[in-house]
Image (tube, grey):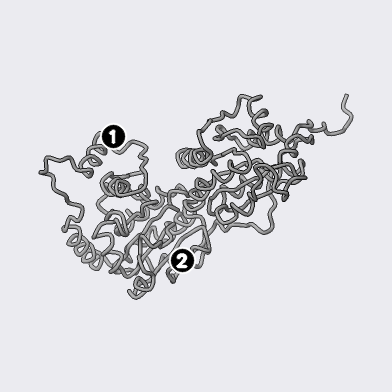
Amino acid sequence: MSTGKEPRAPALTGADIVIKCLEAEGVEYVFGYPGGAVLYIYDALFKQDKIKHVLVRHEQGATHAADGYSRASKKVGVALVTSGPGLTNAVTGIATAYLDSIPMVIISGQVPTHAIGLDAFQEVDAIGITRPCVKHNFLVKRVEDIAPTIKKAFHLARTGRPGPVLVDIPKDITTMVHPFHYPEKVEMRSYNPVVKGHPGQIKKAAQLILEAKRPYVYAGGGVILSDAAAELTKLVKLLGYPCTNTLMGLGAFPATDRQFVGMLGMHGTYEANMTMQHCDVLIAVGARFDDRVIGNPAHFGQVPRKIIHIDIDPSSISKRVKVDVPIVGDVKETLQELLAHIEGHTDKIDKKALEAWWAQIELWRAKNCLRYDRSSEIIKPQFVIEKLYEVTKGDAFICSDVGQHQMWAAQFYKFDK
């Protein structure tokens, strides 16, 4: 017989609530290393079998692993570390995710609330330390705040410009009991990322693109993060314009396509850089004009060209280079809108000017800037990378450290996706 009352939510410990929140977010893996401040969370983690724990040797490995998992799966990576040295060890991986815009949630333990600020054993200011290298961070002070805070953390990590979010939970909060309810939606008045680009700006960009005499498409990591490679490729093929990818944008446009002029920047091809220097309309998509790509902004800005810049992050627009048509919005959605304005109007493109532009690009390409001595008895690294590409047929996950070998991989492995 119904009483007409809603069933009461089960009362759980803070540690159990943390795990239930992760289950609600569809988390499959947690990368971490145990420590005193997170022992109760680990107890709760091992009482269930939906989420698998990956034990690392060092907390930096946990955040790097969560980063790599996110890149490969397109899901939010999750790391679990203890207080003090656990948190400080994790900072390099957190900063990497922040700089590369990788969605990640880091749950860190903290000393009990009554000991915060008293230089307790393994206490560090997790909020202060991570503030410069996270999208946002939270210190949970009440057990009832755990669920809404974790909900906000995942929302922040995956929306707008993705990035890492830290949730710092004192040990005593994980032992307290409270009814569990996971919020269905997030309300954050101060956070409202723009997804759709301004229609007027998109229309202006389409007109400028169609009127270009020496156009150039410059694609960065934002295309990959937005899963917009298909839209970018469709646009470039429709227009017949040259395209370049940055290091973070490799695979955004297929490297085996003739319209691809190679990677751009300090370690890029001659033709890619010369095309950048001589274009009259530059279409920057999910790229940030960093120092390894354009060098000195003052020198770059001396070349007369119109610049269209599409990016989810408004702070990236005109940050290093003043642009003419800024479009703030999700790259995938913005490219779809741009395609709608351009399809059926490609007859406006100056075909003779484009043909002459391609002829110039082919002259630059003929210099074969990446050539190397193939007759040497010593095996060249470039040769190894080329053979690796042939053996894998481009269908492989490629991981490299940082250094010259990374540049060889970028130059000689043809990333089509």
Can you say which quadrant of the picture contains the N terminus?
top right
The answer to which of 18 and 141 lies nearer the viewer is 141
Q: Which mark is residue 203?
A: 2
Q: Quadrant of residue 270?
A: bottom left
Say what secondary structure mark 2 lies in. Answer: helix
Select label 1 or label 2 by which is in front: 1
The residue wearing badge 1 is 392
Total labels drawn: 2
- Could you say where residue 172 lies in the image, as x and y percent from the top left? 75, 38
Mark 1 crowd level (few <14, some 14–19, many ≥20, 10 Å Cα): few
Marks 1,2: beta carbons within 8 A:
no
Residue beneath the point at 15% across and 41% down: 378
User: Hey, what amino acid is under mark 1?
Assistant: Thr
Is residue 359 toward the left or the right of residue 138 in the image?
A: left
Q: Quadrant of residue 72?
A: top left
**Up-down relation of residue 29 to residue 225 (above or below):** above
